[in-house]
Image (spheres, rainbow, N blue to C red):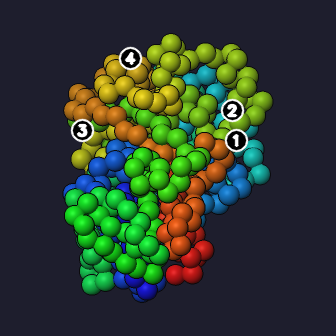
Amino acid sequence: MRVIVVGAGVVGTMHAWQAIERGHEVVHIEREAEARGASVRNFGLVWVSGRAGGEELDTALRARELWEAVGERVPGLGFRANGSLTVLTSPAELAVAEAAAARPDAAARGYALLTAEETRAANPALRGSAVLGALHCERDAAVEPRVAQRALKDKLLESGRYTFLGGREVREVTGERAVRDDHGDVYIGDAVVLCTGAWLGGLVKELAPDLPVRRVRLQMMQTAPLGEALTTSVADGDSFRYYPAYAGGALDAMAAAQQQPPAAAGHRAQLLMVQRADGGLTIGDTHEYDAPFDFDVVEDPYEHLAGVVEGLLGRPLPAVRRRWAGVYAQCTDTARVVHRQQVRDGVWLVTGPGGRGMTCSPAIAERTANELGW
């Protein structure tokens, strides 16, 4: 079988991976020279902890297994099973964590409620005086997003059945299982999978004019090396507000009793933080839903998040080296893991995983391959 994959972000790359693993030939087409969208502008988190029960959690857990298996074969991914701590600084946050740790699926998620002393033992960098404890999730993990796609591509090239074509934008579906790029070249396969991420105009709009997917913008930053190990990924109590696993009476009580500061509320900010291979910290994030988005980044949420980090670390934040914005595609029905649609004979569109793209992409691609009978 010959599979044409359009889009070299993590979702597209994992579709190529699935096809190669099953013995097929892949032509992989990317409009940039390399992936430059949300797949490299993210935390690199394989984030199981906050996922809704049912399909979303099952997908995340399966993806976590697949990421670990791929990481063993592709060291350049920087895969590490570092787990996460959602750090608690108020009784209201502690109540939400207690409710989460009592869920029937808490063991599957790897939840454990830690005291302040146990939190510092698990992650000695968390020296802040306000730390009351943490919700630990041992199933969370991380990869290096800025290099992951290149590392996966290099491994795919070893198969001899993988062709990567960068700097080519697919403009047209020319027939059954065939596409034409902006160079005029036509690619014919046994299946075409469009994994175009947040690029929802042009050809995607033509093929799926009523696509139930929206774009979401976020801001992030990265610091100089911390100078010590951050042994887990870290979230703050505000992250409870943005993940469905924590919904319930305890979260409602927290939201009523504990208002976010204006900068955090205005930008729908939560702290997520992961240490990069060079020792720097990737810190974010914000959520903006109303397009068209601003073209610039603003300082208020960065200042807020920097203050949160300094409070948890009990020390000044290292110098900020990079700031950026990213845009990802999210299903308008946020309970859906991904939008998968046959848009022409033999042509499938897979998009809209939202902030779950890095986490869930291996399992999303596996399901596509199974459904298409690869």
Viewer-side residue, 80 vs 146: 146
Residue 307: percent from the left, percent from the top?
40, 20
Dot 3 or dot 2, earlier in sequence:
2
Asked whether, in this view, residue 329 is left or right of residue 256, the answer is: left
Q: Residue 221, position in %: x, y?
A: 32, 33
Q: Residues within 10 Å of mark 4 (few under 14, many from 20)?
A: some
The residue singled out by tag 3 in the image is 225
Residue under numbered circle 1: 100
Amino acid beneath label 4? Asp
Q: Earlier in the sequence, mark 4 or mark 3?
A: 3
Q: Residue 300 carries which label?
A: 4
Q: Which of marks 4 and 2 is in front?
A: 4
User: Which quarter of the image is occupied by the N terminus?
Assistant: bottom left
Name the amino acid type tagged 2.
Val
Image mark for residue 96:
2
Mark 1 and mark 3 lie on one chain; the one further toward the N terminus is 1
| Nearer to us in this view, 114 or 248 | 248
